Image (tube, rainbow, N blue to C red):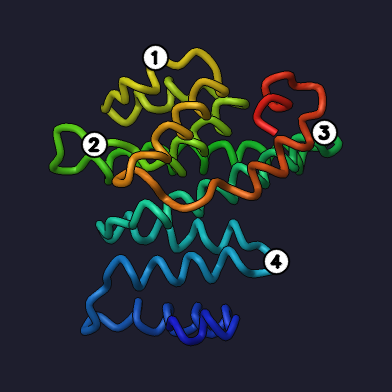
Amino acid sequence: MEEFFKKQKYYDVREIFSFIRENSQIKLDSSFYGITIKSMLMLKNHSIEEAIIIYNDSYNMSIYLTNEIHNFVLEHNLYYYHKARSKEETSENIRSLEYYEGNIKNIIIRLINELMKNRRSVKMSSKSLSLFAWTHIYFDIKEIINKSNHTLMDVKECRSWLDIFKLSCLYNQIPECYCGPFSELFKDILIDMKDDKDAIKVR
């Protein structure tokens, strides 16, 4: 499947996924779901919808995904949510906003729960924290975190999305929390936020 992904044959990846998913003799694992979700997010049409179907199926099959995959799905849902907010308010667009909002909240709760499994304490990745900062621009991230039945003390002490973003920059200097460069999509959104003083500081 990795070869098909590299060759950008994303529909082929989905076909292979469907075949393996229906074959009870083949064991499912996290990497199998991960590469399929990444492929679905590369589709030109209905990418979020296709990815979420696979994402939710992994949950139903009790497959824990990597932090990278959770971040990837969260990042794209945040981006589409932001773009939908700037469109004309129609019944269809309102449904889209509600759909993305539900995805965003569910992804964060699942990300935290899967990261915290069998651990008493754990540090979030810098990438996840930067996406939490992005989320906090629209929603109360602390309220979402509370629904995971876990407490992230560092985030709890933050008063704004900028504070959470600063925290992610701090975590980015800790080897076990470093998770690659920050979201390019988030950078694009910050550039769009021309009237936001905090966004100007970050840019």
Mark 1 lies on residue: 157
Q: Which mark is residue 122?
A: 2
**Mark 3 and 2 residues: CB-CB less than 8 Å, in contact?**
no
Label 1 secondary element: loop
The numbered mark, 3 or 2, whose residue comes first in the sequence reads 3
Q: CA distance from mark 3 to mark 1?
A: 35 Å
**Mark 3 and 4 residues: CB-CB less than 8 Å, in contact?**
no
**Mark 4 and 1 residues: CB-CB less than 8 Å, in contact?**
no
- Give, as a three-letter code, the residue at label 4: Asn
Q: CA distance from mark 3 to mark 4?
A: 22 Å
User: Where is residue 128 shown, x and y percent of the image?
Assistant: 44, 41
Label 3 secondary element: loop
- Give, as a three-letter code, the residue at label 1: Glu
Q: CA distance from mark 3 to mark 2?
A: 41 Å
The numbered mark, 2 or 4, whose residue comes first in the sequence reads 4
- Give, as a three-letter code, the residue at label 3: Glu
The numbered mark, 4 or 1, whose residue comes first in the sequence reads 4
Question: Which-is-in-front pick, marks 3 and 4?
Answer: 4
Where does the N terminus fall, quadrant-wise? Answer: bottom left
Instruction: Count the numbered circles shown.
Output: 4
In this rendering, would 65 be left or right of 46? left
Name above or below for residue 117 compared with residue 203: below
Name above or below for residue 97 compared with residue 35: above
User: Where is residue 100 shown, x and y percent of the image?
Assistant: 60, 42
Q: Which mark is residue 45?
A: 4
Mark 3 crowdedness (10 Å alpha carbons): few <14, some 14-19, many ≥20: few
Residue drawn at x 19%, y 32% as measured from the top left: 121
Q: Quadrant of residue 134?
A: top right
